[in-house]
Image (cartoon, helix red, strand yellow):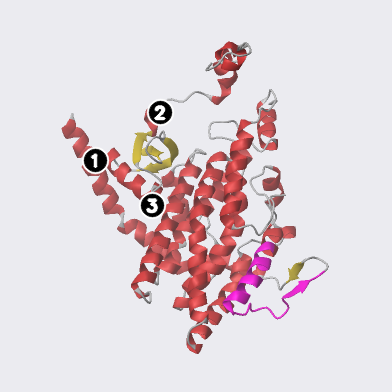
Amino acid sequence: MYGNDFAPLLEQVDSAERDLQQAAGRDVAAGADLQGYFDTIVAADQKIEPRDWMPEAYRKTLIRQIAQHAHSEIIGMQPEGNWISRAPSLKRKAILLAKVQDEAGHGLYLYAAAETLGISRDELVEMLIDGRQKYSSIFNYPTLTWADVGAIGWLVDGAAIVNQVPLCRCSYGPYARAMIRVCKEESFHQRQGFEILHTLSHGTPEQKAMAQDAVDRWWYPSLAMFGPPDGDSTHSERSMAWKIKRFTNDELRQRFVDMCVQQAGILDLRIPDPDLRWDEARGQHDYTQPDYDELMRVIKGDGPCNQERMEHRRRAHSDGAWVRAAARTYAEKRAKNAV
Amino acid sequence: MLFEVFIRPRRGLSHAHVGSLHAPDAEMALRNARDVYTRRQEGVSIWVVPATEITASSPDEKDAFFAPAADKVYRHPTFYDVPEGAAHI
């Protein structure tokens, strides 16, 4: 439906952006009542904008999804931030710094998009910190070696991109526009990870073993990033009807597996799945599903690093309190003196 | 304070809305906007405007609000018949 699934990422994002502009130019004969107007706009692939009427459940679903996405970007800075001071060269360090700064930026674009739905930044930060809202379970796994930075870029960012490119076509305007920005920047993230792994796998035997070990540990958690299988996914159907979501969890997971197999060949690294094979009839790969019980345990808080990630986030927030207070006081003082 | 951010991508183009951010004052908002919205040379000029200072038309009354323009086709050049042979018009 959206052309070649394997078209380069940036082309897919550009085409989402073009379609957005084209759809906006189409005249729609909108229904007279509020629900009718909403339905017509969504059906015509146009965008719902902040001050438009929308069903309350649509608003709530979006707040939950965009907030979780924003929190993931912010928590996602931690596993990689862990390696900034130990990057193997100045070049790698500068790149990693830029990448982690991007994650902060992505978190901010997304918080800004969530705020257009009538929730405040303070509430969102609060809900992350007190655990009422979640972030992606993938960030509860540890980064044990430098190769993990490569595996995160290739697999975790790769999976995120497969998830996020369709979101550039989401029916809610501010979210779609934020995702276009995010996706354009993410492509550098995935490539830098791929390059790290490629360098390691073509280095010494120890370096290659380190790269393979990282891929072995990140493969299944990355597959789990797409969420539970379609049959168990509670929100999928409604989100698809609202065009918040464009593909099911299993469709996206399959697309990711098919992409990775070819790339693993170039990396000369093995995907840790003995049952991975091409299915001629389906035109797709058969593969082993991730452990969904583990996914549920990690989401509920029992992953290797849940506690550490949350403690770090709370500490960073409280340690920064004096900076926020100082900036506010300074602004107030200047405003007063200016009168 | 919530600020809306507008960026001029290149000289000769208009500023366009890119998103929003929080800052204690306009000066900090400008600095934050530079870090959040122009990490890849996306702009040569930034405006920040307190969100509360923006007055917006309401989407609910948009039909009536914009209706006066709908029946004035003579505002478009395509409304007029240009005789065969008239140049530069």
The amino acid sitting under disc 2 is Ile
Disc 2 versus disc 3: nearer the observer:
3
Which amino acid, mark 1? Ala
Q: Is residue A39 above or below residue A225?
A: above
User: Sequence-wise, which precedes: disc 2 or disc 3?
Assistant: 3
Q: Which quadrant is home to the C terminus of chain A?
A: top left
Q: Which residue is mark 2?
A: B54
Q: Where, by quadrant of the figure, is residue B10 drawn?
A: top left
Q: Which residues are magenta?
A: A255-280
Q: Nearer the viewer, residue B74 or A135?
A: B74
Which residue corresponds to the image point at 45% horizontal and 53% vertical from the top-left?
A: A107
Residue A174 position within the rendered picture, expressed as x and y whole percent measured from the top left = 53, 41
Position of residue A73 measured from the top left corner of the image (x, y, whole percent): 47, 57
Q: Are the two marked residues, 2 and 1, in contact with CB atoms closer than 8 angstroms?
A: no
Of residues A88 and A213, the one drawn nearer to the viewer in this rendering: A88
Read off the chain for label 3.
B
Is-magenta flag for residue A168? no
Structural distance between the alpha carbons of marks 1 and 3: 25 Å
Q: Is residue A126 visible?
A: no
Give the Cα separation between the discs numbered 2 and 3: 26 Å
What residue is shown with label 1? Answer: A331
CA distance separating discs 2 and 1: 21 Å
Front-lying residue, A92 or A310: A92
The chain letter for the residue carrying disc 2 is: B
* SS type, badge 3: loop
Residue B57 seen from this side: yes
Q: Classify 10 Å Cα crowding around label 2: few (below 14), some (14-19), many (20 and above).
A: few
Pointer 3: what residue? B39
Provide residue A268's location: percent of width, then percent of height. Answer: 59, 79
Q: On screen, A246 above or below A333? A: below
Q: Would you say residue A257 sits in the magenta stretch?
A: yes
